[in-house]
Amino acid sequence: MSFYEKGKPVHVTLYLTDFVEGSEEDIKRAVKSITEQHQEFAITAQGFSVTQSNWAFINLQYSPKLQRLADEVTMAIEPLRDTNATIPSWVKNYPNKLTAFERYGSPNVFQNFQPHLTLLANEKSPKLVILNKQMQAHPPEAQGKIIGIGIGISDPFGQQKQVIAEYFFNNDKN
């Protein structure tokens, strides 16, 4: 069963890390400020991939606007992160991701940002192989919009288990 089927919000992770206790209000202020400076923008979902550890993704096309948004969020709230957070074991196999984690508390920022929609994590079902073949034969494609930024508490797989704030872009700007 996909995360979406389990009621998890469909989202693109802009920045995922551990934060120090008591930083929630500062994070909210910083993210709200960022959303006030942006407008919604189009995004294209195109393609499907499965990692070696059986995470299934809908891939997103590169978007300079999405990259900038992720970079801005990272820079704004990185100072609030827990600098004693444990490095995930898989990160140690990727020197560029290890460097990013050590500096920013996340392996998937800046040049390592690969936007996607996560469908499954560490999937055990053998049906994933069949699904992957079907998706490779007929890759999914969809148009959508990035309309704001949410803040949430995630589970061990990086999926939202609790949304604590949502801020929508100011679309009145010219």
Image (tube, rainbow, N blue to C red):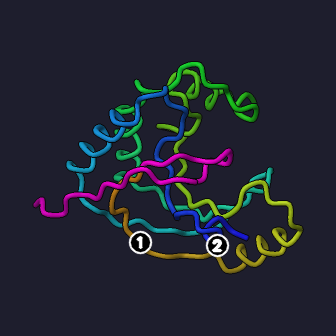
Question: Quick one: 106 or 167, which is closer to the camera?
Answer: 167
Question: Which residue bears the numbered disc 2?
Answer: 5
Quarter of the image where the N terminus is located: bottom right
Picture quadrant where residue 30 is located: top left
At 89% from the left and 68% from the top, the residue drawn is: 126
Q: Earlier in the sequence, mark 2 or mark 1?
A: 2
At 33% from the left and 58% from the top, the residue drawn is: 148
| Furthest-front residue in this view | 22
Q: Position of residue 37 (x, y in %)?
A: 20, 48
- In this picture, residue 54 sits left or right of residue 57: right
- Amino acid at the residue labelled 1: Gly
Q: Position of residue 79 (x, y in %)?
A: 40, 24
| Furthest-left residue in this view | 174
- In this picture, residue 77 sits left or right of residue 124: left
- Identify whether 48 is placed above or below 74: below
Picture quadrant where residue 5 is located: bottom right
Secondary structure beneath dot 1 equals strand
At 51% from the left and 68% from the top, the residue drawn is: 45
Q: Which residues are magenta?
A: 151-174
Tally of marks = 2
Question: Quick one: 66 or 33, which is closer to the camera?
Answer: 33
- Identify whether 148 is placed above or below 29: below
- Amino acid at the residue labelled 2: Glu
Q: Position of residue 143 (x, y in %)?
A: 43, 74
- Calculate the distance from the C-alpha at mark 2 to the C-alpha at mark 1: 19 Å
Question: Which residue bears the numbered disc 1?
Answer: 144
* Mark 2 closeness class: few <14, some 14–19, many ≥20 residues within 10 Å: few
- Identify whether 61 is placed above or below 130: above
* Mark 1 closeness class: few <14, some 14–19, many ≥20 residues within 10 Å: few
Residue 124 forms part of the magenta stretch: no
Quarter of the image where the C terminus is located: bottom left
Quick check: marks 2 and 1 in contact, CB under 8 Å?
no
